[in-house]
Amino acid sequence: MRTTSSTVLFFVIAALCAVGVGSIAIGDFTLRGLAVAGIPIAVGTVVYALYRFPRVELGHRELALINPLQSVRIPWNLVDGFDIHFGLGVRTHEKVFSSWPLAGRGKKMEKDEHGIRRLMDNPNPAVDTVLDRYSGLSDEELSNPRGERTITTSWNLGIIAALVVAVVWAGIGFAALPS
C-alpha cells in the first residue's frame, strides 16, 4: 500500500529524467555524455528509493513496513497498537516502528454546518486501511502458540547499492560537465 501522491510524483519525475537521459544520449553520445547522463539517472533513483519503493504490506500473519533502507516484518500478534499522530507508527513490546510511506492524519479547511470555514481532521485512507485490517483480525491470525514468529529487520541492500552507484555516477557526471 502506497499513497497516491507518491506514485504520481514518481512517474512525473521519472518521465522528466527519461527525457533528460534521452536528450543527453541524442545530443552528446560520447563518454562525457554517458557520465553526464548519471545526473538525471541519480535523481530518478533517489526519487524511486524515497517515494516509490517504500510501502506497507498487510499479510495474512504479519505487517511489513518496507522503508528505503530497512524493512521490518511484525507478526500481527506482536502489535500492541498504533501511533497515528505524525504517521503510522506500529507499537510493539520492543519499540515503535515507523512507516515511511504512510503519513498521519492531516488537516484541511472545510465549511462547518454554519457555513464557517474551519480546520478539520483529514483522515488518511491508507492508515485507516491498516487500522481496519488490525481490528478485523481473526484468532488464527493472532495466534502464535509456540512463539515462533518474531519481529525481523533486514537491510534493503539492493536499494542501498543502487543509491550508492547512482550518486557516484552523478558525481562523475558533475565532474565531466564543462566549466
Image: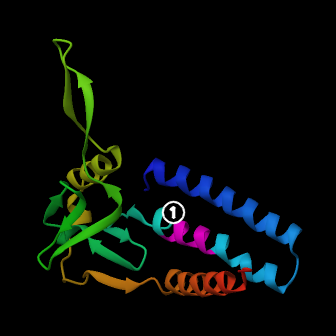
Q: Which residue is drawn at 52% across and 80% down?
A: 159
Q: Which residue is drawn at 18% across and 54% down?
A: 85
Q: In this view, does 33 lie above or below 161?
A: above
Q: Residue furthest front?
A: 179
> Where residue 53 sits: x, y (%)?
49, 67
Q: Residue at x 54, y 81 (%)?
A: 163
Choose top left, top right, bottom left or bottom right for residue 115. Answer: top left
Q: Residue at x 26, y 80 (%)?
A: 151
* 73 lies left or right of 25: left
- In magenta, the rendered stretch is 42-49
Give the quarter of the figure containing the C terminus. Answer: bottom right
> Where residue 45 sits: x, y (%)?
58, 72
Residue designated by label 1:
52
- Please tell me whether residue 24 belongs to the stretch shown in magenta: no
Q: Which of 73 and 125 is in front in this view?
A: 125
Mark 1, secondary structure of its residue: helix
Q: Is residue 22 above or below residue 149?
A: above
> Where residue 29 sits: x, y (%)?
88, 77
Q: Which residue lies furthest to the top in this view?
A: 114
Give the quarter of the figure containing the N terminus. Answer: bottom left
Q: How crowded is mark 1: few (under 14 residues within 10 Å), some or many (20 or more)?
A: many
> What secondary structure predominates along the stretch shown in magenta?
helix
Q: How is the image coloured?
A: rainbow
- Please tell me whether residue 44 belongs to the stretch shown in magenta: yes
Q: Which of 171 and 8 is in front in this view?
A: 171
> Where residue 19 sits: x, y (%)?
75, 59
Amino acid of disc 1? Arg
* 86 lies left or right of 162: left
Choose top left, top right, bottom left or bottom right for residue 22. Answer: bottom right
